[in-house]
C-alpha cells in the first residue's frame, strides 16, 4: 500500500510561501550553483529584485575565478559560507543528478540549500521559465482535493507510476531538495523496436529524436513537427538516410485545423501564445494529429512536448487514441493541472494503460506520461 498524506497534499499549496519565508534567513546572500544559461538568468532576475547574489559556483574548474555576467565564479577553495547564505541548485541538463549537487553544496559548508523552482515561487520570478509549471503550489489549489488525488492514482497502471505522482505532488507543494525523485532508467512499457513510425510533436531542433533513435531500430517513417521558423530551419538540416520516409513539418499541433498565434523565440521558450501580444508573435498553420497520422505505417509512437499545449493537441487525436496501434508519450510539466487533466482525458479511451515517469527529474520537469494500448504492453507486470 502507498503511504499517502492527503492532508499534507491538500493543504500544501496555500502554505508553501509561509513555509519558505519562515525557514529562510533574513537578508540572505545567494550563491548560484551552476553558471550556465539558467544560472545566469536566475542571477539577473534576483538582482533585479534587489537581492544580493554573491557569486556563481560551478563544477567546471575552467570557470573558477572567471567573471560571468559581472559575477565571479568562485573557486571551491575560496568558499566560506556564512550561516545566512543560501545556495541555489540551478542546473538544467538531463544527465544532472540533483542528489550529488545537494551533497556537494553541503560539503562546501552551506546550511541552506534550495532547488531553483522553490526560489522562483518564493521570490516571484515567474519569467525564469514562463512555459514550465514551476508555480505548481500557486496553481494546484484547483486540483488538491484528496478525492481527485485518489482518482489520479487509480488511473495510473502500476505502483511505480503512483509513487512518482506522489513524489511530484509533494515536491511541488514543498520544494525540498531531499524530496526530489531520482532519475528513472526503468524500461519502457512497450517495445520500441516494434515501432514503424515516430511522430515528434514539438521537435525543436531534433535533439530528443536523435537521442531516442538508438531504441527505435525498425523505423520506416518519421514526422518531425516544429512551429518556430528558426528552429524549423535547423530541423530541416537533419538527414536520416536509413529512414525511408522522413519529413519535417513547419506547423503547430492543435485540436483543429487553421492558424494559431505563436510566440516564436527561437529557443526552448517558443510556445502557443495566450497572453499579451509580443514582438515575436507570429501566425502559424495548425494540423491535428489525426490529419497527420491517417496514412502512416503502424505501430506509431507519438511524442508530445508542446510547452503547455498538449491537452489541446490531444483533442485533435480522437482516431489515434482509439487505435490499438498508437502509443503516446506526453509531457506534463508545462501546466500545473496537466498531471490531473491529461490522465483524466485519456481515461475516456478503453484498452489503454497509463504510466508516469520522471525521466529528467532534475527539476521534476521532464515528467512523461505514457499511454500504451494493452496490445503493446511489453511486460505483464505493467498491467
Image: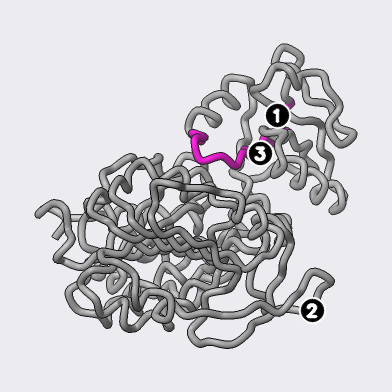
The percent position of residue 152, horizontal first and vertical second, equals 31, 70
Mark sitting on residue 277: 2
- Of residues 96 and 89, the one drawn nearer to the viewer in this rendering: 96
Indicate which disc, 2 or 3, sits on the residue closer to the N terminus: 3
Distance CA(mark 2)–CA(mark 1): 45 Å
Mark sitting on residue 83: 1
Judged from this view, the residue extending furthest toward the right is 70
What range is drawn magenta here? 82-98
The percent position of residue 136, horizontal first and vertical second, equals 55, 64
Q: Which residue is mark 3?
A: 88
Q: Is residue 84 magenta?
A: yes
- Alpha-carbon neighbours of circle 3 within 10 Å: few (<14), some, or many (≥20)? many
Q: Is residue 156 magenta?
A: no
Distance CA(mark 1)–CA(mark 3): 15 Å
Residue at 62%, 59% in the rendered image: 18
Q: Quadrant of the N terminus?
A: bottom left
In the figure, 101 relative to 14: above or below? above
Q: Main secondary structure of the magenta part?
A: loop
Residue at 40%, 40% in the rendered image: 183
Which element carries disc 1, helix, strand or loop? loop
Q: How many marks?
A: 3
Indicate which disc, 1 or 3, sits on the residue closer to the N terminus: 1
Amino acid at each position: 500500500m502507498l503511504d499517502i498524506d492527503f492532508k499534507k497534499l491538500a493543504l500544501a499549496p496555500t502554505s508553501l510561501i509561509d513555509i519558505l519565508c519562515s525557514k529562510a534567513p533574513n537578508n540572505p546572500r545567494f550563491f548560484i550553483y551552476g553558471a550556465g544559461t539558467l544560472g545566469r538568468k536566475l542571477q539577473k532576475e534576483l538582482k533585479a529584485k534587489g537581492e544580493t547574489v554573491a557569486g556563481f559556483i560551478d563544477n567546471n574548474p575552467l570557470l573558477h575565478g572567471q567573471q560571468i555576467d559581472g559575477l565571479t565564479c568562485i573557486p571551491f577553495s575560496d568558499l566560506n559560507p556564512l550561516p545566512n547564505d543560501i545556495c541555489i541548485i540551478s542546473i538544467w541538463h538531463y544527465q544532472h543528478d540533483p542528489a550529488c549537487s545537494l551533497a556537494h553544496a553541503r560539503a562546501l559548508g552551506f546550511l541552506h540549500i534550495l532547488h531553483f523552482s522553490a526560489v522562483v515561487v518564493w521570490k516571484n520570478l515567474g519569467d525564469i521559465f514562463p512555459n514550465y509549471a514551476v508555480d505548481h503550489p500557486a496553481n494546484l489549489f484547483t486540483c488538491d482535493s484528496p478525492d481527485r488525488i485518489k482518482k489520479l492514482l487509480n488511473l495510473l497502471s502500476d505502483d511505480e507510476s503512483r509513487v512518482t505522482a506522489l513524489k511530484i505532488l509533494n515536491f511541488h507543494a514543498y520544494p525540498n531538495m531531499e524530496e526530489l525523485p531520482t532519475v528513472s532508467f526503468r524500461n519502457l512499457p512497450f517495445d520500441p523496436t516494434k515501432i514503424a513510425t515516430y511522430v515528434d510533436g514539438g521537435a525543436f531542433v531534433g535533439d530528443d529524436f536523435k537521442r531516442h533513435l538508438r531504441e527505435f531500430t525498425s523505423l520506416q517513417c518519421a514526422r518531425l513537427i516544429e512551429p518556430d521558423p528558426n528552429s524549423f530551419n535547423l530541423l530541416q538540416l537533419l538527414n536520416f538516410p536509413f529512414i525511408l520516409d522522413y519529413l519535417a513539418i513547419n506547423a503547430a499541433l492543435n485540436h483543429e485545423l487553421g492558424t494559431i498565434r505563436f510566440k516564436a523565440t527561437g529557443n526552448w521558450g517558443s510556445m502557443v501564445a495566450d497572453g499579451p501580444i509580443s514582438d515575436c508573435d507570429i501566425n502559424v498553420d495548425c494540423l491535428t494529429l489525426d490529419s497527420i497520422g491517417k496514412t502512416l505505417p503502424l505501430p506509431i509512437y507519438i511524442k508530445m512536448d508542446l510547452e503547455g499545449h498538449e491537452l489541446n493537441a490531444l483533442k485533435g487525436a480522437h482516431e489515434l487514441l482509439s487505435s490499438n496501434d498508437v502509443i503516446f508519450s506526453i509531457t506534463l510539466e508545462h501546466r500545473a493541472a496537466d498531471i490531473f487533466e491529461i490522465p483524466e482525458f485519456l481515461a475516456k479511451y478503453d484498452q489503454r494503460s497509463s504510466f508516469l515517469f520522471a525521466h529528467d527529474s532534475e527539476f521534476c520537469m521532464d515528467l512523461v506520461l505514457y499511454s500504451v494500448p494493452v496490445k503493446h504492453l511489453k511486460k505483464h507486470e505493467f498491467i
